[in-house]
Amino acid sequence: MPRPARLGFDLVEQGPGQLDELRVLLGLGRHDLLVQGLLAPVGFRILFQACNSIGKLAVRPEPGRQGRLERPIAVDHQLLAGFRDPGRRAGREGEEGRFAGDGEMTPIRPGRVLWDTNFVPDAGAFELKPWEARGVGSGNMQFILADGIMGAHASEMPVGTYKKGHRHGPGLHVFTVHGSGYTLLWYQGDEDFQRVEWRHGMVFAPPNKMFHQHFGTSNKPARYLAVGLGSKRYPVVQLRRAGSENNRSDVSIKKGGRQIEYEDQDPRIHPLWLRELAVTGVPSRMGKFFDEEAMLRELKTSAAE
């Protein structure tokens, strides 16, 4: 059993077939939870233990190692001193039950539904709210963890769909939670795409103002978690603030936003995705946006040549 350590901003995931049970013990209230993925804030002097109670194979917390942050940063909007304060931050602990997964929801608009909590027991099972502007059937939840300035949001694509491409500032780290698929990345003017294959537990960070687009290809919804400096309540960095106020990620670049609508995307993108679905046997739900019959005929003709 690892020695208790200070809690970092960690997503803890189990790999397929690696772990049947994971126990996380939090020093405040000593909540004993069985989880697949958990999300918790930085800034408190909380003790925790992650216990592999099955012990067949290893489990690895991300992004910190052995329960600590590799690069602690200022995470407290009240003090902006991060780890200088040795005491508990009562003003940020919130109502009783916040360390057991309880919280308060604040709906502002689609894509800006906030969940105030100190602990998300399972990032893969948490209920998301609709954000259709980001893609067919898209769901999202913005997390406010311990009223801190580290931001996190979970998004999900239903089976047979994909998100619209967009871009934003640097620093958002994308963790795949469940489902399979891939992400295409490119800078404006690039001739080719860069491609990241999704697999459970992997993480990548789209660079500053690099377009990227997420695609689901499996018979299960594809969910990811994005974590970075600046939340919807406390944007902190200029580009995050602009995204919250006017230069929004769900508004077309033609209208001053940062999103590429389906009808404006590169014509190679949808046929590429249809080829992936042909391999997995998943039906597309995107037919109302594209002439898929013509695309499939062209794909069959190209394959026969």
Image (cartoon, helix red, strand yellow):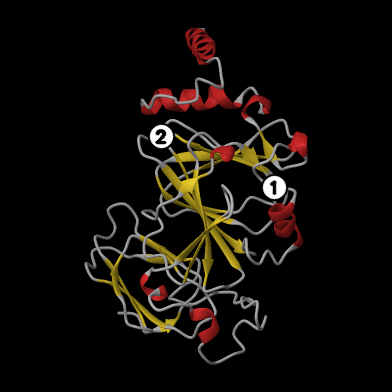
Asked if the residue at tag 2 contacts the one at tag 1, i.e. Cβ–Cβ closer than 8 Å, the answer is no
Reply above or below: 105 against 186: below
Mark number, residue 159: 2
Q: Residues within 10 Å of mark 1 (few under 14, many from 20)?
A: many
Q: Given the image, on which type of amino acid does mark 2 rest?
A: Val
> Residue 258's spot in the image, x, y percent?
71, 42
> Residue 121's spot in the image, x, y percent?
37, 65
For the question of whether residue 169 can be seen, the reply is no
Reply above or below: 23 against 47: above
Residue at 50% x, 25% y: name it: 286
In this rendered view, identify the residue nearer to me: 81 or 173: 81
**How far apart are labels 1 and 2 at the CA level?**
26 Å
Mark number, residue 218: none
Please, what secondary structure does the residue beneath circle 2 have? loop
Q: Residues within 10 Å of mark 2 (few under 14, many from 20)?
A: many
Reply above or below: 87 against 244: below
Q: Is residue 123 left or right of residue 187?
A: left
The first of marks 1 and 2 along the sequence is: 2
Can you name the residue that lies furthest to the bottom here? 86
For the N terminus, give its image quadrant: bottom left
Residue at 66% x, 67% y: name it: 234
> Residue 129's spot in the image, x, y percent?
47, 48
In this rendered view, identify the residue nearer to me: 189 or 33: 33
Residue at 65% x, 25% y: name it: 263
Please, what secondary structure does the residue beneath circle 1 have? loop
Q: Is residue 137 left or right of residue 230?
A: left
Tag nearer the camera, 1 or 2: 1
Q: Is residue 265 left or right of residue 174?
A: right
Q: Given the image, on which type of amino acid does mark 1 rest?
A: Arg
> Residue 277's spot in the image, x, y percent?
43, 26
Mark number, residue 248: 1
For the question of whether residue 259 can be seen, the reply is yes
